[in-house]
């Protein structure tokens, strides 16, 4: 509805852009979380382990942060390959840190 009903030229300010990025963030979080959960279920030989749900939600959140950040940087025309690579590397390292910290407890 945000994509089809809001005209950015019609509104003063950044309300259509904020609405677009917020709905995009929620949609990507939900979609990536579901995909991540089912991939984890398939890799664990179809055993539904609900402990994977927290990890899947976190991974979906990280993917949504990356995509929303990439699109917002591209909107302002400041996205470069170096920025994208550093963002991806930082998210991967942060996820590895969280997974390794969780196993030690």
Image (spheres, grey):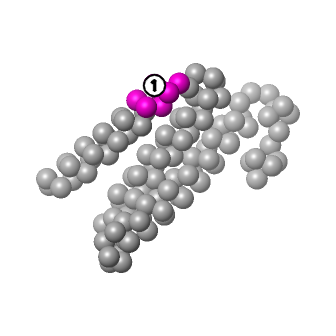
**Residue that badge 1 annotates:** 82
- SS class of the residue under badge 1? helix
Quarter of the rendering containing residue 39: bottom left
Q: Main secondary structure of the magenta part?
A: helix
Which one is in front, 2 or 90? Answer: 90
Residue 99 belongs to magenta span: no
x and y, in percent, of residue 35 in the image: 48, 62
What quarter of the picture does the C terminus occupy? Answer: bottom left
Residue at x 25% of width, y 43% of height: 97
Query: Does any portion of residue 50 appear in the rendered image?
Result: no
> Hey, which residue is sitting farthest front in the picture?
81
**Region of the chain picked out in magenta, as a range:** 80-86
> How far across and down, in percent of the image, does residue 94 sit?
31, 40
- Which x, y percent locates residue 86? 40, 29
Q: Is residue 98 visible?
A: yes
Residue at (69, 36) in percent of width and height: 17
Q: Residues within 10 Å of mark 1 (few under 14, many from 20)?
A: few
Q: Nearer the viewer, residue 53 or 40?
A: 40
Q: Residue at x 59, y 54 (%)?
A: 27
Taking 19 as reference, is 35 above or below it?
below
Q: Is residue 52 left or right of residue 105?
A: right
Q: Front-most of 43 and 94?
A: 43
Q: Residue at x 80, y 43 (%)?
A: 6
């Amino acid at each position: 509805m945000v994509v089809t009903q809001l005209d950015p030229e019609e509104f003063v300010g950044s309300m259509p852009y904020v609405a677009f990025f917020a709905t995009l963030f929620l949609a990507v979080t939900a979609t990536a979380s579901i995909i991540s959960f089912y991939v984890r279920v398939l890799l664990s030989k179809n055993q539904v382990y609900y402990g994977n749900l927290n990890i899947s939600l976190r991974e979906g959140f990280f993917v949504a942060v990356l995509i929303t950040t990439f699109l917002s940087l591209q909107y302002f025309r400041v996205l470069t390959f170096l920025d994208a690579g550093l963002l991806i590397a930082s998210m991967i390292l942060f996820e590895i840190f969280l997974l390794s910290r969780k196993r030690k407890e």
